[in-house]
Image (tube, coloured by chain):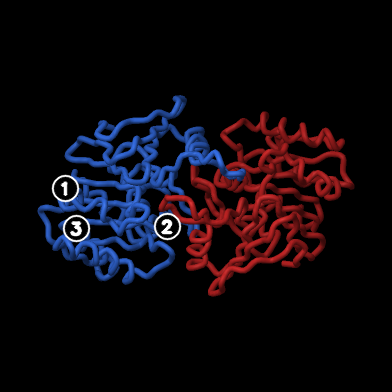
Chain colours: A blue, B red
């Protein structure tokens, strides 16, 4: 496998995918055309608008982008893809669409067989075992929460440390993930913004500038450094 | 109907249910015993522990508390209840348990027929049409997102304004609710902490000290003052 699962597409104050540019060039070095999966529709933008946004970035590195929504036969399109990028947005909408169009399994098979894959945020959530550690609002009801399982754990993108100044009684991210662990025996990788997971062959590492917080059932959460194998 | 749907159980720096005490006394003025629904299990605490916490508050106002989990026949228990309180925690876990035990419909019928109902946070979410505007993490997969619909809209508890100082690319609450409105034509009441919805008979008002933010499809969000009818 050859995949990147990134916490976010855009760093605060940065441009879309800018901080990941060398990594993305490396990931897609063997291809000049990728398929973009726009179904997470951040802020409700259309598939066309979202694909245009992805295309603007990839044009800079001489890679053509086709939106998966443009194809009559989407399964064939994924089977023929030379690279795949799933953008962020709402994970519930993304997972619902992928299951309804029978694409989750097809994506999984192709990526497992070597098609390079980039995911950001919701697109990274679907690389995990299931979407039960997304931060998104359940705006639609997917037929299942199961995902591709490209890595043997779950991802919490945009991982955020508790803010001691916040006078608000909503749960912290850590509390939420600990609640998940009361119901599931699944490792969760709390991926801070600016970090990503890299899988090449069977080797999985965490990359970026920040530490990464790992949550496991019946253990205290712990931090691992960039470059650590997962 | 005679119901309170509160944004939170506990204000920052306050004790459990303290700020709502006069309202709760008024709601349950005709009863000396209520049933507590502990299924949302905040932080994963047990049904027993959570019921104990509720009991500690209600003892102060001379109301006995029985946990719904204590009953062999839970449907009969709800049918015989003189008052019902559903505590906060994880809405997915709460809704899954209620649907699996066939309790959602039974709760709805009893509250619509006059049993006084108090909900906090997740317990307020289930008073809305569905749980698609919860803030919680989808740690379990409920058989449906449908809820009691005691009010003809959805609730977003712990409504939080965007923090301009946050250097983080996760979605704001407002962005999330706007994404919901791209997929659903349902009014959303953004209930800031310290506010609650009061329904007496067919009259629904918003109460508390803060303004309440209302979101509707194809409209700019707007604010309403305490006491406004919904």
Q: First in sequence: mark 2 or mark 3?
A: 3
Q: Residue furthest bottom?
A: B218
Quarter of the view holding residue A55 = bottom left
Which residue is disc 1 drawn over? A114
Distance (Cα) linking label 1 and label 2 = 26 Å
The mark lying in front, picked from 1 and 3, is 1
Image spot of residue A108 (x, y percent): 26, 49
Circle 2 SS class: loop
Q: Which mark is residue A90?
A: 2
Tally of numbered tags? 3
Chain of the residue where label 1 is placed in the rendered structure: A
Left or right, residue B192 beside residue A204? right
* Residue plotted at (79% across, 65% down): B203
Task: Say which label, 1 or 3, has the lower sequence index.
Answer: 3
Percent of width and height locating residue A78: 22, 59
Residue that protrudes farthest toward the top in the picture: A219
Name the residue rendered at 47%, 50% in the picture. Answer: B166
Q: Which image quadrant for residue A217? A: top left
Q: Residue furthest left?
A: A30
* Both labels 1 and 3 in a single chain: yes
Q: Is residue B77 left or right of residue A177?
A: right
Q: Quadrant of the C terminus of chain A?
A: top left
On-image quarter of the N terminus of chain A: top left
- Which residue is denoted by mark 3 in the rendering? A79
Give the mark nearer the N terminus: 1 vs 2: 2
Crowding at dot 1, Cα within 10 Å, few <14 / some 14-19 / many 20+, comes out as: some
């Amino acid at each position: 496998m050859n995949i990147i699962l990134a916490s976010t597409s855009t760093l605060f104050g940065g441009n879309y995918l800018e901080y990941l540019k060398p990594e993305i060039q490396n990931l897609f070095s063997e291809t000049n055309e990728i398929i973009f999966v726009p179904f997470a529709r951040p802020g409700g933008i259309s598939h066309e608008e979202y694909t245009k946004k992805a295309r603007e970035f990839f044009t800079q590195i001489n890679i053509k982008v086709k939106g998966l929504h443009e194809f009559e036969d989407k399964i064939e399109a994924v089977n023929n893809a030379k690279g795949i990028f799933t953008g962020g947005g709402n994970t519930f909408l993304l997972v619902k669409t992928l299951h309804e169009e029978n694409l989750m399994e097809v994506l999984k098979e192709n990526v497992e067989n070597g098609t390079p894959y980039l995911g950001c945020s919701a697109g990274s959530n679907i690389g995990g075992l299931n979407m039960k550690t997304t931060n998104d609002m359940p705006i639609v009801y997917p037929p299942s929460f199961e995902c591709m399982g490209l890595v043997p754990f779950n991802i919490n993108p945009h991982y955020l440390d508790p803010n001691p100044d916040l006078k608000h009684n909503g749960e912290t991210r850590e509390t939420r993930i600990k609640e998940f662990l009361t119901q599931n025996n699944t490792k969760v990788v709390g991926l801070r913004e600016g970090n990503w997971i890299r899988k090449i062959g069977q080797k999985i590492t965490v990359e970026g500038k920040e530490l990464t917080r790992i949550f496991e059932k019946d253990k205290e959460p712990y931090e691992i450094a960039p470059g650590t194998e997962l």
